[in-house]
């Protein structure tokens, strides 16, 4: 990942932060009561699209704020963690988080069956465009659950992932032959060699999404498709929940796209969207996941829903129409 273009403001005098960063000061003797995220150095950045500091604050969630650019309408989070921290946090803690309502997953690998079931359903979107198996590249492939589904369907699969534990799992547990550790900007792959490139829940995490999508453009066959799945901040569900929307996870979700801003993003990397829909944006989830996430709306709801845990391994398919899948082709 790379930093965005544009100036970084100086830190406030006397706050003890390095230039270009902010750090929430902790009162003496009160460190244990201060949220961990409030103690980390952060940096304010301009709008990624237009480079201006012209933000309208949607809401504050200290030390973060979700803002909308007054000039272009792009929605993003300020301030942001340092680049090195954004890389580091995806190694171990992200996949076994003790605060999954605001960061990461409680037990990502334990939900393998649910992810594979979800991806089998989502693969039908790809199969409408590609009627026979070919070569597929998954950028930010995590443990490789999507690639396992496609491998079983006869596809030649390649994955790219920055997390070493996830790369090791994909190779050792799933037996996937080609999974590179790194990001798409650092891994050497053959140009125009993939029929399908996917990015599932990835672009909102990237500091420079245009650079990554441009790299995908270079690797995609001229008749190939790029599939991007991300959350839709303009959806009705997101508007109704407001600041309680489950995708406002400020440390990891740096940007919040809507169909217009996603189209603008892809156009900058010479892609054109041919389809954008929430139809297959849902996922199979455990009852424990439901209990955990409703607690974000109100703690009492989590208590009321807790009997759902007694259903054990039962799965539920949820689609709140707040995640969109875009299919794009080269221009």
Image: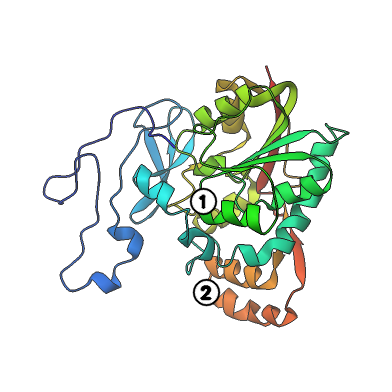
Image location of residue 110, percent across then percent down: 65, 67
On screen, residue 208 versus residue 203, left or right, reads left
Compared to residue 330, the image places residue 289 above or below, namely below
Q: Identify the residue at image location x=37%, y=51%.
A: 64
Q: What is the x, y in percent for residue 246?
A: 56, 58
Question: In the image, which is nearer the foreground, mark 2 or mark 1?
Answer: 1
- Give 133 or 206, whichever is nearer the viewer: 133
Measuring 53% from the left and 57% from the top, which residue is drawn there? 165
Q: Give the residue furthest to the right.
A: 131
Within-10-Å neighbours for mark 1: few <14, some 14–19, many 20+: many
Q: Going by the image, does 87 lie left or right of 171?
A: left
Q: Mark yes or no: residue 50 visible.
A: yes
**Who is closer to the viewer here, 128 or 15?**
128
Residue displayed at 69% across by 69% down? 286
Judge the density around disc 2: few (<14), some (14-19), many (≥20) Cα neighbours within 10 Å. Answer: few
* Residue identified by numbered label 2: 299
Q: Position of residue 155 (x, y in %)?
A: 79, 40
Q: Identify the image quadrant of the N terminus.
A: top left
Secondary structure at badge 1 equals loop
Foreground of the two, 69 or 12: 12
The residue located at (70%, 78%) in the rendering is: 308
Please name the colour scheme applied to the rendered image. Answer: rainbow
Q: Are marks 2 and 1 in contact (CB under 8 Å)?
A: no
Q: Is residue 5 left or right of residue 107?
A: left
- Image quadrant where residue 124 sits: top right
Quadrant position of the C terminus in the picture: top right
Real-space Cα separation, disc 2 to disc 1, in angstroms: 32 Å
- Element type at marker 2? helix
Q: Which residue is mark 1?
A: 163
* Residue 80 visible at all: no
**Residue 88: x, y in percent?**
41, 51
Residue 53's label in the rendered image is none
């Amino acid at each position: 990942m790379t930093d965005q273009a544009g100036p970084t403001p100086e830190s406030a005098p006397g706050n003890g932060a390095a230039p270009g960063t902010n750090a929430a000061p902790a009162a003496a003797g009160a460190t244990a009561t201060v949220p961990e995220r409030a103690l980390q150095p952060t940096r304010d950045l301009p709008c990624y699209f237009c480079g201006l500091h012209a933000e309208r604050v949607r809401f504050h969630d200290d030390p973060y704020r979700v803002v909308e650019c007054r000039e272009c309408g792009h929605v993003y989070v300020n301030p942001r963690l340092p680049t090195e921290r954004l890389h580091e946090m995806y190694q171990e803690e992200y996949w076994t988080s003790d605060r999954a309502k605001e960061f990461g997953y409680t037990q990502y690998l334990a939900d393998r069956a649910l992810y594979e079931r979800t991806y089998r359903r989502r693969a039908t979107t790809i199969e409408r465009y590609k009627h026979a198996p070919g070569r597929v590249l998954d950028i930010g492939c995590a443990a490789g659950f999507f690639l396992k589904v496609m491998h079983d369907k006869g596809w030649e699969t390649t994955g790219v992932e920055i997390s070493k534990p996830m790369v090791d799992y994909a190779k050792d547990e799933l037996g996937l032959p080609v999974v590179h550790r790194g990001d798409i900007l650092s891994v050497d792959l053959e140009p125009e060699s993939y029929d399908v490139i996917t990015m599932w829940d990835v672009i909102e995490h990237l500091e420079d999404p245009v650079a990554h999508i441009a790299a995908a453009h270079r690797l995609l066959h001229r008749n190939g498709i790029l599939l991007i799945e991300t959350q839709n901040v303009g959806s009705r569900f997101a508007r109704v929940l407001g600041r309680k929307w489950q995708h406002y996870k400020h440390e990891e979700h740096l940007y919040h796209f809507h169909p217009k801003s996603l189209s603008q993003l892809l156009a900058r990397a010479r892609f054109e969207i041919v389809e954008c829909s929430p139809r297959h944006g849902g996922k199979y989830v455990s009852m424990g996941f439901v209990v955990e996430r409703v607690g974000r709306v109100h703690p009492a709801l989590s208590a009321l829903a807790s009997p759902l845990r007694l259903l054990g391994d039962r799965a539920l398919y949820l689609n709140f129409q707040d995640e969109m899948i875009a299919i794009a082709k080269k221009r």
